[in-house]
Image: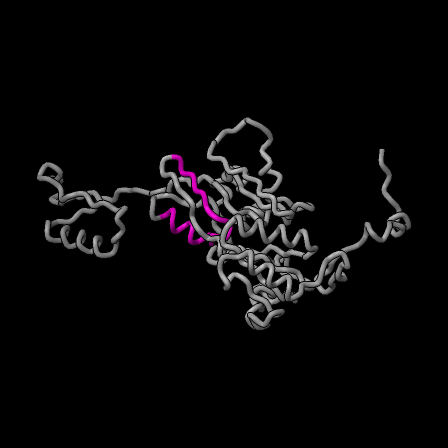
Amino acid sequence: MFSRPSLRALRTLSASARQVRYGGSLPSRSAAFTVPTEKHVADLRSLLSSPTSLLSTIDQSATAAELEGYNQDWMNKYKGKGPLVVKPKSTEELSAVMKYCYDNGLAVVPQGGNTGLVGGSIPIHDEVIVSLANMNGIRSFDPISGILVADAGLVLEAADNYLAERGFIFPLDLGAKGSCHIGGNVATNAGGLRLLRYGSLHGTVLGLEVVLPDGTIWNGLSKLRKDNTGKWIAHGLLGETTESHMVEKFLSMCGGLAPPCLRASGRTVFRAHTRLRLETALHRIRGHNRSHHCRLDPLPSPAERDERRGVLSVIV
């Protein structure tokens, strides 16, 4: 039977066990990381396919005001000092950038839609900000199985609209859907408004393709609903909050299940003493309800009349 620890025993805990990062405090810069220089900027720029994929105040290719959106969260609670933003457009570019930073000791902060509330995507000192905003494509969608393969930088609302046009719905909905990225949703195992209906992302994500900190590409994309060929490593990357948290942020693609849209249907009986009144009511209904999901049945045949009450009935 365990005894309750005394107050003196709690006070004698080691300092390392009691270290807490408060909102108003910042950890000191680690000497293990290299300070970014103009050479680093030039080398990273050579790894990218577009000159606009890199913004930096080091080589004066961008101003501090242009980098403010990457160094500050949307609630203005956290503010960083990152002088360099890299926005790769493919998995290969992301892998090359990560390998270079790993080999040269450059600290990296992954960033998606920057809609978090705890400052996890905001740099502290002079880290390299790796934004996935340019990796926002949809690779494929199978309407038979409902499997979507998309880049991690795809905005949640764009994915939901894409599926809605095809009669499907994304199994996740958030208040920040107009800005948040699917990669960030998967990385944090976001729940959202549709959690109770469709479950968590652990059940709807089938596979991941991940770029590790050293630039290695781990391809775990799978379109199988059931795969018993080995341990499902993606479960350890989805919503992970331990030391591998940075790894999952570099999701380059994710395959998930998109359920079909739910459609409601119903019938209403209208009755009128004359056919003219009935036709007038139906005309007004058609004017207010222009949805292609709503179908109005034709006017009733003489057999559908209620002769006893002298009225006409129609089912909408």
Residue 168 is situated, as x and y percent measured from the top left of the image, at 38, 43
Q: Quadrant of residue 234?
A: top right
Nearer to us in this view, 32 or 15? 32
**Magenta segment includes 165:** no
The quadrant of the rendering that contains the N terminus is: top right
Which residue is at 75% across, 61% downward?
Answer: 29
Residue drawn 52% across the image and 47% down it: 252
Magenta region, residue range: 145-164
Q: Please state which of residues 195 and 67 is positioned toward the viewer in this rendering.
A: 67
Name above or below for residue 65 compared with residue 246: below
Residue drawn at the location 52% of the way across and 48% of the way down: 91
Report whether 34 appears left or right of 150: right
Magenta-drawn stretch contains 146: yes
Q: In the displayed structure, would residue 35 be above or below residue 17?
A: below
Residue at far top of view: 228
Image quadrant holding the C terminus, namely top left
In this view, 237 is above or below 123: above
Q: Position of residue 131 (x, y in %)?
A: 55, 57
Q: Residue at x 22, y 53 (%)?
A: 285
**Residue 40 percent across, percent down from the top left:** 64, 61
Q: How many marks?
A: 0
What colouring style does the render use? one colour
Q: Does residue 159 appear to the left or right of 121 in the view shown?
A: left
Q: Is residue 59 left or right of residue 227?
A: right
Q: Is residue 240 above or below residue 121?
A: above
Would you identify the image quadrant in which residue 119 lies?
bottom right
Counting from the top left corner in percent of width and height, residue 266 is at: 29, 42
